[in-house]
Amino acid sequence: MKELPTPVSIEAISDGYDDGGVDQAGSYAVYITRFKEVGLDTLSQLIQKLRNCGCPVNCIVYDPILPWAVEVAKKFGLVSAAFFTQNCTVDNIYYYVDKGVIKLPPTQVDEEILLPGLSCTIETSDVPSFVSTPESDILVEMLVNQFSNLQKADWILINSFYELEKEDVWEMGIKAKQDEKGIVRREVIEECIKLVMEEEKGNVIRGNAKKWKELARNAMDEGGVQIKTLKNLFPS
């Protein structure tokens, strides 16, 4: 185990190809299969080793690209957290590819794609190349398999950019601040009401609320993004 000048230590597990990785395996398909077989075993060995030396593991935070990690967590009775390291919108695209909402490959270069959760359409050029022009089926399979057992994870952590999304996310309403005991006091609530009802920021909040209400209504209309999603998820 490598000790760092922080409370963090690093120890590697084997992917089954310690001398050459993917190149040694010869193909992604072989590599992914072998990594799962060896990774399940070597991660289990590491957890047991740490337990035996008095440093027991309490939680496994794993990249869903390696969905088998949650199985190891369950085996040892550990808390598990799936951490999507790519941008939230990119993972959203992978998810709807998995559900069949986004077809592979897109049929037209300039095809507009309606993606649930986004307030606008995207084009084929906006879609990750892994999806629009995949090098191999195994890469697409690896990406969509991130969601194969996600329901088993205790926590799901998403990589998002607050500075890019704060207007849409936070200005939908007033965020009441809690005190050190986690209580929102009366005077704070009164101030929030005053902001919404009287001050200029209230106009912005009400405007955003109307915008999202209209987007929601359009999504549920015939031909809207949510109707299309439901038809793809639950075909008649």
Image (tube, rainbow, N blue to C red):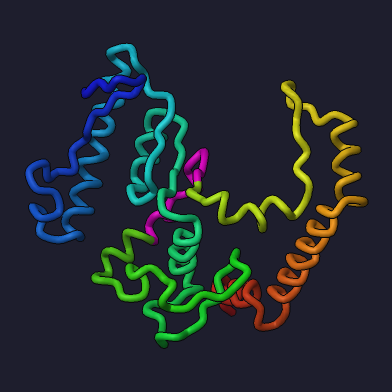
In the rendering, at what x and y percent does residue 151 appear?
Answer: 50, 48
Q: Nearer the viewer, residue 119 or 40?
A: 119
Q: Is residue 180 magenta?
A: no
Q: Position of residue 177 (x, y in %)?
A: 75, 34
Judge left or right: residue 19 versus residue 67. Answer: left
Outermost residue toward the top in this view: 54
Work out whether 117 lies above or below 183: below
- The answer to whether residue 92 is above or below residue 33 is below
Q: Residue at x 27, y 33 (%)?
A: 43
Q: What quarter of the picture does the C terminus occupy?
A: bottom right
Q: Residue at x 72, y 76 (%)?
A: 218
Task: Write down the quadrant of residue 50 in the picture.
Answer: top left
Residue 225: percent from left, percent from top: 62, 75
Q: Residue at x 36, y 75 (%)?
A: 132
Assign the N terminus to one quadrant of the image: top left
State the extent of the magenta-drawn residues as a range.
144-157
At horizontal 35% and vertical 41% (from top left) the residue drawn is 69
Nearer the observer, 61 or 179: 179
